[in-house]
Image (spheres, rainbow, N blue to C red):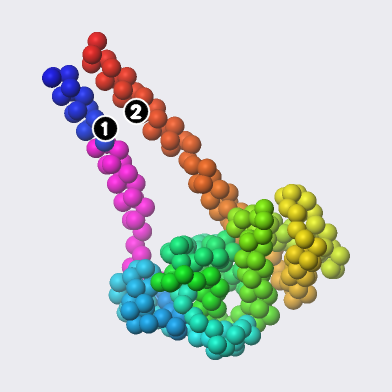
């Protein structure tokens, strides 16, 4: 009985240490003072889709952690904004909402889908890529929806948030960014391609454009083909042409990706990290395995 008591106590202590460690890690991750108001950039901006009911809007407030509405600037994005900013459908239903916190230069873009189960098509990397195309940098953006949506309208809400602060975003860039988002979600539905692969492809093409500064459509076509070959991606002639058309349009309106090359590198790292998370943190699980191995060896020694 004494031996079993020792084993029971050892297991309880072990579980206690593990839970304590996890709890401490979680606490450490939440020590940032999110309530502090940035006096340089102003309050965070929360943009609600106009189709939300009052109950859904309250739900989104909770999802975006708007505990005190007086500490954010709340605005609504409408279908008319969609038509005005990117020539979209003025009869669209707008559910996607976002919280935008402007940051100092060098912070890059940090995008989180708070409700990934409800933002069904647009990923964090797709949002970040499109925002860089539109000319948006250095911000923390949280996107949420109380119902299942593709997530496209959130981008227009983000544009309106910047507009509300007196920022002038180029309409041509906003439109091509929206085209990029449409193409990205369309390609991600093709056989043999997933969200991460598509985002990686778009990011690598932009990085190559930043390095090579293509002067003609032929130059763009070569960059696109080189990246497709490098990543071993097979596209139909039609999809390949759409990709070339998109990046040639970016070239024609003089989008300079060399200015955001560091942020493109950050997107690449995020994609790689996401892929690693799918595989699993081998180092963590190895340490857990070793811990229990030593624990059971210790327990076995109690019987000797």
Q: Where does residue 31 sit, x and y in percent of width and height? A: 33, 56
Q: Which residue is mark 2?
A: 292
Query: Which label number is shown at residue 14?
Result: 1
Q: Viewed as shown, does residue 172 lie left or right of 107? A: right
Picture residue at 41% right of the left edge, 81% below the top = 52
- Label 2 Cα crowd, 10 Å radius (few <14 / some 14-19 / many 20+): few
Work out whether 26 lies above or below 202.
above
Query: Which label number is shown at residue 161?
Result: none
Q: Which residues are magenta?
A: 16-41
Contact (Cβ within 8 Å) of mark 1 with mark 2:
yes
Q: Tell me the element at label 1.
A: helix
For this orientation, the residue located farthest to the left is 1
Residue 12 figure quarter: top left
- Which residue is more in the foreground, 242 or 98? 242
Going from N to C along the chain, the mark reached first, 1 or 2, is 1
- Which residue is more in the foreground, 290 or 4? 4
For this orientation, the residue located farthest to the top is 304
Q: Tell me the element at label 2.
A: helix
Q: Is residue 190 visible?
A: yes
């Amino acid at each position: 009985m004494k031996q079993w008591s020792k084993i029971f106590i050892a297991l309880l202590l072990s579980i206690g240490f593990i839970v304590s460690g996890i709890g401490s890690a979680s606490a450490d991750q939440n020590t940032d003072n999110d309530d502090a108001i940035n006096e340089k950039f102003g309050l965070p901006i929360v943009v609600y889709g106009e189709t939300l009911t009052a109950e859904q809007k309250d739900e989104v407030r909770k999802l975006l952690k708007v505990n005190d509405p007086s500490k954010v600037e709340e605005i609504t994005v409408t279908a008319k904004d969609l038509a005005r900013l990117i020539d979209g459908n003025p009869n669209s239903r707008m559910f996607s909402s976002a919280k935008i916190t402007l940051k100092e230069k060098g912070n890059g873009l940090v995008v989180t889908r708070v409700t990934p189960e409800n933002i069904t098509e647009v990923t964090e990397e797709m949002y970040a890529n499109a925002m860089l195309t539109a000319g948006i940098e250095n911000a923390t953006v949280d996107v949420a929806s109380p119902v299942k949506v593709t997530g496209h309208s959130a981008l227009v809400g983000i544009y309106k948030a910047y507009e509300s602060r007196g920022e002038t975003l180029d309409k041509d860039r906003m439109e091509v960014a929206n085209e990029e988002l449409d193409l990205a979600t369309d390609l991600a539905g093709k056989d043999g391609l997933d969200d991460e692969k598509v985002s990686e492809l778009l990011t690598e093409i932009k990085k190559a454009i930043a390095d090579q500064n293509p002067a003609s459509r032929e130059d763009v076509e070569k960059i696109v083909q080189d990246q497709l070959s490098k990543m071993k991606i097979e596209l139909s002639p039609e999809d390949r042409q759409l990709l070339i058309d998109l990046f040639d349009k970016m070239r024609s309106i003089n989008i300079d990706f060399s200015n955001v090359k560091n942020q493109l590198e950050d997107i690449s790292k995020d994609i790689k990290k996401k892929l690693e998370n799918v595989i699993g943190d081998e180092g963590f699980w190895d340490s857990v395995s070793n811990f229990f191995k030593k624990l059971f060896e210790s327990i076995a020694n109690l019987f000797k």
